[in-house]
Image (cartoon, grey):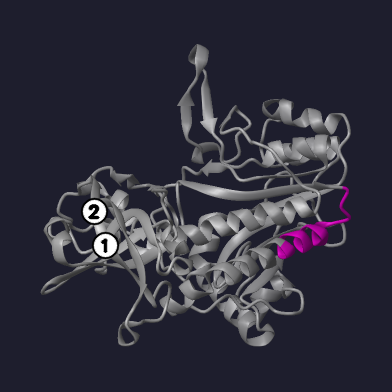
Amino acid sequence: MQRTLVGELGGQVGKTVSISGWVDVRRDHGKLIFFDIRDRSGKVQAVCSGAILADAEKLRPEWVVTLEGIVNERPEKMRVDGQNGNIELAVAKIAVLAKAAELPFDLSADLNLDTYLDNLPLTLRTPLARGVFNIQATVVEAFRETLREQGFIEFQAPALVGADVEGGAASFAVDYYYGKKAFLATSPQLYKQIMVGTLERVFATPKVFRGEKHATTRHLSEYSSLDFEMGFIKDHIEVMAVIESVVRAMVGAVTSKHADFFTARGVQLPLVPEQPFPVMKLREAQKILGAGEEPDLEPEQERAICEWAKKEHGSDFIFITHYPVAKRPFYTYEDENNPGYTKSFDLLFRGLEITTGGQRIHEYDTLVAAAKAKGLDPDKFSFYLQAFKYGMPPHGGSATGLERFTARMLELPNVKEATLFPRDLNRIDILLHESDTVEE
């Protein structure tokens, strides 16, 4: 018999079907055994009685099974809200596809983060984890769709780069051929810019790698970056308009597909104002906060200015622009009307920077001079600089951390909870040295 997904059973009342999935929960009630069976589309209650009880008694949580039976309406007093709350499967046949060992803990229990991460092959099956990463998939899909609608083309950025790696000592070195060193890319930035000279509007969703020795709730050694770059712009404002349209689309897609998950978690959907996202220069934000003129906002200041944006503008998002030249990468465009400051921005969301971007320098001589001013050797960037030597339009772009965006959307306290397989200072799948980890 052909398999029917659990999510399709609502239209099969009175019919005999075959479903396959995992035993999510088992409940014994005298001469009846109830199971919640889970597949990729949801869950349904299965009822075993009579001759099938002997086989049903063997089943345990996470066993993989195929069940055949009739889809019945539940008795009125047994109906519940939610998916398949009005139906159940009366089981006639059980086939065990795979047994599972006894679980080390109840999957419905509140687990500390290390226990959750140490057991990810199992804990990723929890409703929370499945919900988080379904939402994350929706975010990526909306990112791609929105940019394609605006004429952007996806390209595949390299993960191995040469001596022109951004980040310097904060990069992971890799043994390469002929005794040379390569590096894991800290960003697709230089390649995005090169591709503007080819396709004008491009985007990528690469894994990027950061070697800073952070052990915080907001940093990862490997994360997914949602990047785009666009040519023929007037200034950074056009870039901000595109990323705002993308963020609105991502929030809209999540709201449309996953509102029930937010309700179940008791989490508010992001506040997206009808008007454009609020925008202010760094110095303006610091003045509002009564802070000194530092080159960046501290984490507590990011949280405070986001609270201000929420109160004053009904927005969980706020752009901060015009960071000092000294704070930004060498390729960032200096504002000719505000010397010493750049046509750059960060987008903050619920107290955390999720996006950075801006206009880039597009003139060859200016770019070479900017690299030298940062103490960089232009010869190490000769491959990248070819794009500018042979003509590049004014351009700009941005990069958004997928895991940070997901974590703030769901108000998860640690970005690792929004990361499928986190890598950080202490962990690659399991803790590197349990006796020598760094506290967060």
- Residue 10 on image: x %, y %: 46, 69
Q: Which residues are magenta?
A: 232-245
Residue 92: tell me if it is visible.
Answer: yes
* Picture residue at 43% right of the left edge, 72% below the top: 83
* Kind of residue at badge 1: Val
Q: Is most of the magenta stretch helix, strand or loop? A: helix
Question: Where is residue 102 drawn, in percent x and y?
Answer: 14, 54
For the residues labelled 2 and 1, the Cα–Cα distance comes to 7 Å
Instruction: Give the side of residue 175 with respect to residue 107, left or right.
Output: right
Q: Which mark is residue 109?
A: none
Is 127 placed left or right of 102 in the picture? right
Q: Nearer the viewer, residue 113 or 183?
A: 113
Q: Position of residue 246 (x, y in %)?
A: 70, 61
**Is residue 363 depicted above or below 242 in this figure?**
above
- Residue 71: image quadrant is bottom left
Q: Is residue 239 magenta?
A: yes
Q: Quadrant of residue 194?
A: top right
Mark 2 touching mark 1, by CB under 8 A? yes
In the image, taking residue 439 as reference, residue 331 lies left or right, namely: right
Of residues 282 and 352, which is closer to you in this image? 352
Q: Secondary structure at mark 2?
A: strand
Q: Which residue is mark 2?
A: 94
